[in-house]
Amino acid sequence: MGNLCLKNVVVTIVIVLIHLQLVASTWWFISQLPLHAVGAGVLCDNVPGLVGRQRRMCRIHQEAMVILGQGALQGVHECQHQFRQHRWNCSTLDRDTSVFGKVLLKVGTREAAFVYSISSAGVAYSITRACSLGHLSTCACDPNRKGRGRDKQGNPFQWGGCSDDVNYGQKFAKMFIDAKEKQHMDARALMNLHNNKAGRQAVQKQRKLECKCHGISGSCAMRTCWRALRDFRRVGTFLKNRYNGAIQVMMNQNSADADLVVANRNHKKPTKYDLVYFDASPDYCNEDLELGSPGTAGRECNASSIDTDGCDIMCCGRGYHTHTEKRVDKCECKFHWCCDVVCKNCTRTVDVHTCLGERTQRKYKWGH
């Protein structure tokens, strides 16, 4: 009875959101829905932002849709971690099917490039991992890892164990995520497709070779090895570095085929790992409800930092307010045999700095 009520509530919420957001809808919205609780089948025809092919895949691969939603959410969380100390902190919007705000849909910025890449990476990563764990009936371990192989140093080994089938994860993510972009194939679609692919390539690049030794006393006379995914944080960090070095592109006006070229001829041609963008980023300083930018008013900043988390940069020159508060941390931790770590709770008083908004900056003196 409880599950039936939950399903009815979720479907009602989705239908309301469809009426609220008819245009600015994206597949990212799947990351905000409790698919594990109600099942993908209930929502396949009701999730806003899906195109025909995505809905068909949703109906056919319902078990994979739950994993896909988890991967999309993993991408959101990683984005928020990587940009936690930036003006734009990858915040999501409640009851908004664009998820990140219309700014990422309307303007082809570096931030948009990162969101598309990390979302695609999250889906490819989650599908790949689910295959290895046996959570999907359509895939398993990588069937191509058989026989003998050699590591980067040229040392031989025998393929064994369960290599993560990243090719299947990439293929599934590509079929689902790229479907909407391929309906238009305009300049922005080409940008999104490139960044989607960059995210999937990052997952493949951030794999590692794990091995187990066999022989007398673990002498490694023979090794069995398999390819394994690294922690998703490494994928996020890799893509964040690509964000920092993102390449500005434009449509090639001299070509009969739709393709992208670098905007500055002195810059290198983007590789499959690079992120590309069209437009300069806004400053993200002030709240813009139309674009979905929350601004930096009220954000906590570091008064002693000269980096992006510093009050001068984070607060956009508006100044900041300082107050003191007590925080409780674990301290004086001791290990007790055999398996316990016992800590005390220590209270400390800290100065907390928060950015002023446009309306409040005149009420306080700058700084302290």
Image (tube, rainbow, N blue to C red):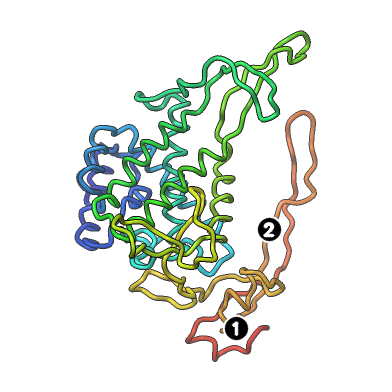
How far across and down, in percent of the image, does residue 28 sit? 35, 52
How far across and down, in percent of the image, does residue 70 sit? 41, 42
How far across and down, in percent of the image, does residue 99 sit? 36, 58
Check contact, mark 1 vs mark 2: CB within 8 A: no
Q: Is residue 78 left or right of residue 57?
A: right
Is disc 1 surrounded by few (<14), some (14 to 19) or many (20+) residues within 10 Å? Answer: many
Q: Is residue 319 left or right of residue 257?
A: right
Split into 4 quadrants, where in the image is the C terminus?
bottom right
Q: Residue at x 58, y 24 (%)?
A: 226
Q: Which sits in the foreground, 219 or 345?
A: 219
Looking at the picture, which amino acid does disc 1 mark? Gly
Q: Secondary structure at mark 2?
A: strand
Looking at the picture, which amino acid does disc 2 mark? Val
How far across and down, in percent of the image, does residue 114 sit? 47, 56
Which comes sooner in the sequence, label 1 or label 2? 1
The answer to whether one can see residue 95 in this image is no
Q: Which sits in the foreground, 50 or 243?
A: 243
In the depicted structure, whether residue 184 falls above or below residue 121: below
In the depicted structure, whether residue 141 falls above or below residue 69: above
Is disc 2 surrounded by few (<14), some (14 to 19) or many (20+) residues within 10 Å? Answer: few
In the depicted structure, whether residue 310 falls above or below residue 25: below
Q: Which mark is residue 328?
A: 2
Q: Residue at x 44, y 31 (%)?
A: 130
Q: Which residue is mark 1?
A: 319
- Where, by quadrant of the figure, is residue 173 drawn? top left
The answer to whether one can see residue 50 in this image is yes
Q: Residue at x 24, y 51 (%)?
A: 183
- Where, by quadrant of the figure, is residue 234 drawn? top right
